[in-house]
Image (cartoon, grey):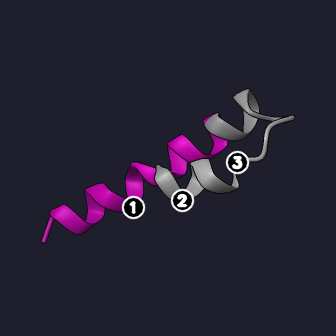
Amino acid sequence: MKRPEVLPQIPPPLAPRARGVWGAVPVFPFDQGF
């Protein structure tokens, strides 16, 4: 039951980071990939 807690914790940190790096670039495809 500890696996579901690790999955949601990985996407949040990756989403804000990609938006900052790819600010001018569309993160739509990237958000779905990560």
In percent of width and height, residue 29 lies at 62, 54
Q: Main secondary structure of the magenta part?
A: helix
Dot placed on the residue nearer the N-terminal end, 2 or 1: 1
Residue ID for mark 2: 32
Left or right, residue 19 beside residue 7: right
Dividing the picture into quadrants, the one containing residue 1 is: bottom left
- Kind of residue indicated by mark 3: Val
Dot placed on the residue nearer the N-terminal end, 3 or 2: 3
Q: Nearer the viewer, mark 2 or mark 1?
A: 2
Alpha carbons under labels 3 and 2: distance apart: 8 Å
Instruction: Tell me where the magenta segment starts and ends, as one range.
Output: 1-17
Q: Secondary structure at mark 1?
A: helix
Along the line of sight, the residue nearer the viewer: 31 or 6: 31
Along the line of sight, the residue nearer the viewer: 20 or 33: 33
- Kind of residue indicated by mark 2: Gln
Residue ID for mark 3: 27
In percent of width and height, residue 32 lies at 54, 59
Residue ID for mark 1: 8
- Kind of residue indicated by mark 1: Pro
Residue 13 lies in magenta, yes or no? yes
Left or right, residue 25 beside residue 1: right
Dot placed on the residue nearer the N-terminal end, 1 or 3: 1
